[in-house]
Amino acid sequence: MALPVVRYEDSGHTGWGVLFNDRIAPLAQHAATTGDLIEHAIPALRALTAAQATLPLAGVRLLSPITTNQQFVCQGINYASHVRESGMDPAKIPFNTIFTKASSCLAGPHDDVVRPAHVKLLDYEIELGLVMKRSVTKARAITPDNLHEVLAGVTIVNDVSARDVQLPQMQFYKGKSYRSFGPAGPVLLLLDASEWKRWPELRMRLTVNGQVRQETLCGDMLFAPHQTLTELSALQDLHAGDLIATGTPAGCAAKAPNKLVYFVMNHLLSPATKWKLFIQKGLANPLYLKPGDQMTASIRTDDGALDLGEQRNRIVAA
């Protein structure tokens, strides 16, 4: 049965617990990191009951369920709708795009997102986050049937991005790693083997100031979790608690230009002129995030059986 685990701060104490409606059943066992929790405390978490939920949710500050010691690996252009929106054909995407974010960008599900003073084109990206169950230190074939052996659960991730850094500089890491650019949570939803088969039914929804910007089923992914994990296992070590953000669907503020404009920008303009025009056009785009904007993100199945909760993050100026 899906288990919603939260990490919280209460009167200066950081703890873990299981969420039962609007109350938390605290975990007595100490876990310094997400990896420690997953490797040593899952039986104790599953033993907690609603009768032990003595801590009101409203009285605590929820933290990112992913601690900053964990790796933060990401996929790009991994949704068919986003690929089409970017002016490409999903059938012609030849490889899985992988990059990383600094784990120091992780933020709580209700924390403010700080827009640096030099950033003007701030964008949102709702993503399904996969959380590792155990270490994978050699190449391994992951299939839909054994996904539960290597993954513990899922969480909401917002891959906040400074497009005026990321794109002109071709720096995904810099443009996406400023502190607070990785809201995660509110819950780490632990899944069993049968529940993992339902990941394509998860519906992602992100609004800005109440306006729906992104809404897509996770089944729109081009490279499914088992494919990505198989590829990553041949590339690098992964450990319990590490986070893999699986890409975002259509609806971001950043949009690809039409084919004629694209040709002119790439063949007739210098790089400096091209990116100057890109930023000028972006400044006129009302979809980019501004101080005072409120992002709300949720991921759940339509029947509510799997519910990752809701993020609410306000944009503030540095």
Image (spheres, helix red, strand yellow):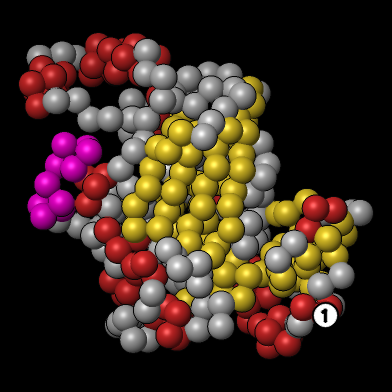
Most foreground residue, 210 or 200: 210
Q: Amino acid at mark 1?
A: Ala
Residue 147 to residue 292: above or below: below
**Residue 287, position in %: x, y?**
41, 25
Residue 75 to residue 287: above or below: below
**Residue 117, position in %: x, y?**
58, 19
- Residue drawn at point x = 66 percent, y = 36 percent: 112
- Residue drawn at point x = 43 percent, y = 38 percent: 212
Which element is circle 1 on?
helix
**Residue 96, position in %: x, y?**
25, 58
| Quarter in which the N terminus is drawn | bottom right
**Residue 201, position in %: x, y?**
36, 67
Left or right side of 191 for 285:
left
- Residue drawn at point x = 83 percent, y = 78 percent: 52
Picture quadrant of residue 164: top left
Residue 38 to residue 313: above or below: below
Most foreground residue, 298 or 30: 298
Picture quadrant of residue 57: bottom right
Regarding residue 75, the answer to whether it shows in the image is no
Hey, which residue is sitting farthest right in the picture? 11
- Mark 1 residue crowding within 10 angstroms, few (<14) / some (14–19) / many (20+): few
Regarding residue 49, the answer to whether it shows in the image is yes
Picture quadrant of residue 166: top left
Most foreground residue, 258 or 266: 258
Which residue is labeled 1 in the image? 51
Magenta segment: 84-93
Residue 205 colored magenta? no
Left or right side of 130 for 275:
left
Left or right side of 107 for 270:
left
Residue 217 to residue 255: above or below: below
Left or right side of 203 for 132:
right
